[in-house]
Amino acid sequence: MVFNSLTFLVFFACVLVLHSMPFNWTTKKVNLLIASYVFYAAWNPPFVVLLWVSTVVDWYAAQKLVHAERPAVRRAWMLLSALANLGMLAYFKYGAFLLQSLSTVVAGIGVVYKPPAFDIVLPVGISFYTFATMSYTLDVYLRRAVPARSFLDYALFVTFFPHLVGADHAPDGTRPAVRGAASRHGKHGALRPGADDPWDVPEDRARRWLSRPRRGAGV
């Protein structure tokens, strides 16, 4: 599904209608999340699994980092995030290049190796969402941010369809992405009055977390 197609216009009209209905704010965010998965699956449904893997791994890694005190444990959770995301990216985006490079290297020592045909479809937006989720976990690891309290808000940040496949670069953080998803008035609008802000972390809690010693914070 591309942005300039009739299918997208129908899809977007349905999203706007649902978003304008008098549902509570949680229901609206669920509708946006489902719509984003439908939008992504319209291109290649099986690749939604990769999006889920990246989302779930980094959600749990960030949550575990909050409670982990030992540097080795914190490094292990950060390493899990890096391996999961960079592993997927390396396989789908650089697999053919790595195989060809291996063939060239072994040929230099007299070994003839012909790599198998590597005809893998590159998932749309994989560079965006892998680096977006991994940078989220890295910010928590370095104590530059507190993790999101709601999985729904975090998943919507990762999956929101206008930036998932249409952005040239990742947003600066989770707040503008979900604020944009939440707005009736476009990407840069604010949450409706009275809505709960998932990043409205109590000031004392945020200050305690961000000021904790960064033992073992180096990658």
Image (tube, rainbow, N blue to C red):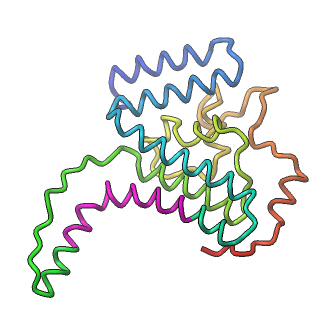
Quarter of the image with the N terminus in it: top left
**Residue drawn where x is 66% and y is 66% of the image:** 74
Counting from the top left corner in percent of width and height, residue 136 is at 61, 55
**Residue drawn where x is 58% and y is 39% of the image:** 155
Judge by depth and name the residue closer to the eye, 25 or 140: 140
Q: Quadrant of residue 140?
A: bottom right
Counting from the top left corner in percent of width and height, residue 213 is at 80, 72
Q: Quadrant of residue 21?
A: top right
Judge by depth and name the residue closer to the eye, 146 or 192: 146
**Up-down: is 92 above or below 158?**
below
In the rendered structure, the answer to whether residue 61 lies left or right of residue 200 reads: left
**Residue drawn where x is 24% and y is 66% of the image:** 97
Q: Which residues are magenta?
A: 79-101
Quarter of the image with the C terminus in it: bottom right
Counting from the top left corner in percent of width and height, residue 55 is at 53, 45
**Residue drawn where x is 83% and y is 54% of the image:** 206
Residue 98 part of the magenta-drawn span: yes
- The tally of labels here is 0
Judge by depth and name the residue closer to the eye, 28 or 169: 28
Residue 44 part of the magenta-drawn span: no
**Up-down: is 188 above or below 202?**
above
Judge by depth and name the residue closer to the eye, 68 or 185: 68
Residue with the most extreme bottom position:
109
In the rendered structure, the answer to whether residue 58 lies left or right of residue 105 reads: right
Counting from the top left corner in percent of width and height, residue 193 is at 79, 26
In the rendered structure, the answer to whether residue 115 lies left or right of residue 121 reads: left
Q: Quadrant of residue 106?
A: bottom left
Q: Give the main secondary structure of the magenta stretch.
A: helix
